[in-house]
Amino acid sequence: MSRGNLGALHLADGLVVSDSWFSPGEGPFTVLAKLAIANVLDAKRICRVFGVRPSQRPEATPHGRSLLHLEWLARSRSAPQLAASLWKRGLLSQSERWGRAVASDRALRYCPTCLSMGYQSVICQVEGLARCPQHNDWLLDHCSACNAPTPRYAVTAEAFDEPLICGHCRTAYAPIWGPAGGGQFRTRMGDEGAYLRLGRWFARADALDVQWPDQVGWLADPRAPAQAVEANKRVHMLGTLTSVAPLSEQAACCHSDLWTGTWALSSSSPQAYSASGATRDELTQARVAIYKSIRRHHARRFGVKVEAHIAGGSQQMVLSSHGMVMPCNEHVDPARHGFLAWRLRFESSASGQGSSSRLSLFQVLLLWPVDWSASDAAWGQFAYRCLLLDIDAARELNKALKGLDYDRPEDFPAWLEVVGLWCHRFGSQTRPWPDGLSALRLPGAAGKPGDLYLIAARSAAFDQGTTHEC
């Protein structure tokens, strides 16, 4: 490493450093990597500089020495100057709430062009971002030479004993980081404007007083692999945020199969019947009528007779003790199964089609969105999207039941195991509505109620096209 490559040097908390090594929007990973190379530090020595021990739980989420979640660094008294500098470069310093929701430290993600200039932005850790917003390169989380995964975005031996060198094939992720690179630390990004704009966008999103009561429960699948569930949720979180706060770099984001609808709220309080002049009975009648209209339309479409006993006439269905109806085998029409499951979700007392029939809906669904007062039009879309998601879940269950039959004794254990993995999707034990559906409130100005956003994970039912929708 030649002295000309190092720039003007000075000491910071006992380490050799030069301000010319770093770009303004550069993330903590490459900043720390340069410090480690210049000062001959491995992961253990880096931890020692900051007065902490290496994490004893490498599988933890977030990692105990995460460079995305930098609380451990913010508490450092051994190297306060460096700790403060790294904290400012972290995503949580720009948006603590949404940084946690959309980004991950599971693997270093990088743009090959950026990294060839000695640069990686913490924005790359946003899993809903598919391409570099500056160069339009695909963001990678693996070695381009051997396809081995990159290390955690954290201070680990894999990441910092030889920074930005693949631990599997020993190839540098970009030539500048290898022996032939010669420590060209002064190589800088010519333009990082797109990353800086994204950072400012996160700060604006953080300033919005978004109220999202079931944010944690949304898209939570208790039976699926946790890592896959969280990665999927982070992608859709970014998609939701861009609906609330439009993003100029939208083209760099992953395609998020979400449906969103927006309506003005009539009140920021739980269903305020007096606000619209409607009584409780009038609101109930209006929403039951909407529900029955959706039910009638789809009963005709699926060739299902609306009977007082929801599972009546469905010899190929099994009604569980939890009030859920499950198919006996793959030959059950999943659209009909989803329709019946949707009815069981909504109807507290079933009814037939007669003009004098009385129908009661579960109160938590009837009064959705529960925390605020929404229009009947918004409620109608809520009920309809629940139906589409239940049909979608029924289709996926149908695939999982291939070759199994409830009535064959030798198949029963396997059938029971599959149904056990799927039953939570059709019941209300964890959430009254499907886990793919959620709602948030964006408050208005000057104390106005603001807007309601209804969010639904795009269902396979949409593949049928808009001509089949209500």
Image (tube, grey):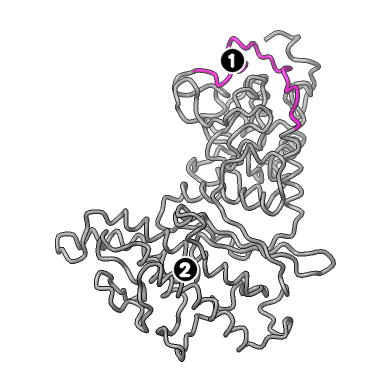
Say if 29 sits above or below 287 in the image.
Answer: above
Numbered badge on residue 175: 1
Q: Which residues are magenta?
A: 171-193
- Closest to the observer, 177 or 360: 360
For label 2, the residue is: 430
- Closest to the observer, 61 or 148: 148
Q: Residues within 10 Å of mark 2 (few under 14, many from 20)?
A: few
Could you tell me how many numbered marks the image carries?
2
Q: Position of residue 443 (x, y in %)?
A: 75, 64
Is residue 214 left or right of 90 when viewed as pictured? left
Q: Quadrant of residue 251?
A: top right
Say if 216 sits above or below 72 in the image.
Answer: below
Tell me how far mark 2 sits from mark 1, CA to CA: 51 Å
Say if 314 sits above or below 134 in the image.
Answer: below
Q: Residue at x 58, y 64 (%)?
A: 214
Q: Residue at x 57, y 33 (%)?
A: 109
**Most frequent secondary structure within the magenta stretch:** loop
Is residue 257 left or right of 351 when viewed as pictured? right
The mark that comes first in sequence, 2 or 1, is 1
Is residue 207 one of those drawn in magenta? Answer: no
Outermost residue to the front = 467
